[in-house]
Image (cartoon, helix red, strand yellow):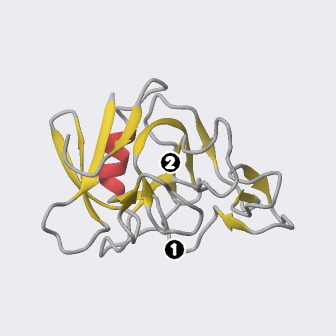
Amino acid sequence: MILDVWPQPGAGAPHLGQARLGERRFPCALGRAGVRRDKREGDNASPLGLFPVRRVLYRPDREPPPATRLETCALTRGDGWCDDVADRAYNRPVALPYPARHEKLWRDDGLYDLLAIIGHNDDPVVPGAGSAIFIHVARPDFSGTEGCVAFRVDDLRWILARLDAASVVRIGETEP
């Protein structure tokens, strides 16, 4: 199954996107800088390309285990993701506390209450080519992400229920 994602034409903001899974369409948020073919760490862009969906994480105190055929794991307060280009764990999950720069996955704002890891820059990892690219919960105003793709939580649940280990995310410049 292919989850297609692209910037919304005429939206006037590069982070406003559209997505399609099968015949169903969804609004989504993209990186604040839109999408880029040459994704770089800290550029606030979503990467262009075709990427596998690796696994799903959820916050068990806020979300039940999601209905999905993807590998699923409950988050803990000690889960993080390294985004330090000089660290050997760059673009990998890490246990907190962690000495290098990282993102905390257990967040207060709810954005990572339910998330899927996109297989961007992970096989092999190239330092500086972007890290922590996820599908996650959008802010209510669909403001831009740091490079992820974000959906309303109900839409995200619907999407995840239909994805499996063979599913991919295709992030494009235009509607396919």
Question: Which of the two residues, 60 or 118, is positioned nearer the viewer here?
Answer: 118
Residue name at image x 61 percent, y 56 percent: 131
Residue 63 shows in the view: no
Q: Height in image: 116 above or below 79?
A: above
**Residue beneath label 1, please?**
109
Residue 24 appears at what percent x and percent y?
17, 41
**Residue beneath label 2, please?**
64
**Residue 20: which quarter of the image?**
top left
Residue name at image x 68 percent, y 44 percent: 125
Quadrant location, the C terminus? top left
Q: Earlier in the sequence, mark 2 or mark 1?
A: 2
Residue 97 vs residue 51: left or right?
right
Quadrant location, the N terminus? top left
Q: Amino acid at mark 1?
A: Asp
Question: Which of the two residues, 35 or 115, is positioned nearer the viewer here?
Answer: 35
Find numbered disc 2 in the image and state the secondary structure of the residue it sits on: loop
Residue name at image x 81 percent, y 62 percent: 96
**Residue 28: which quarter of the image?**
bottom left
Residue 85 appears at what percent x and percent y?
73, 61
Residue name at image x 41 percent, y 65 percent: 31
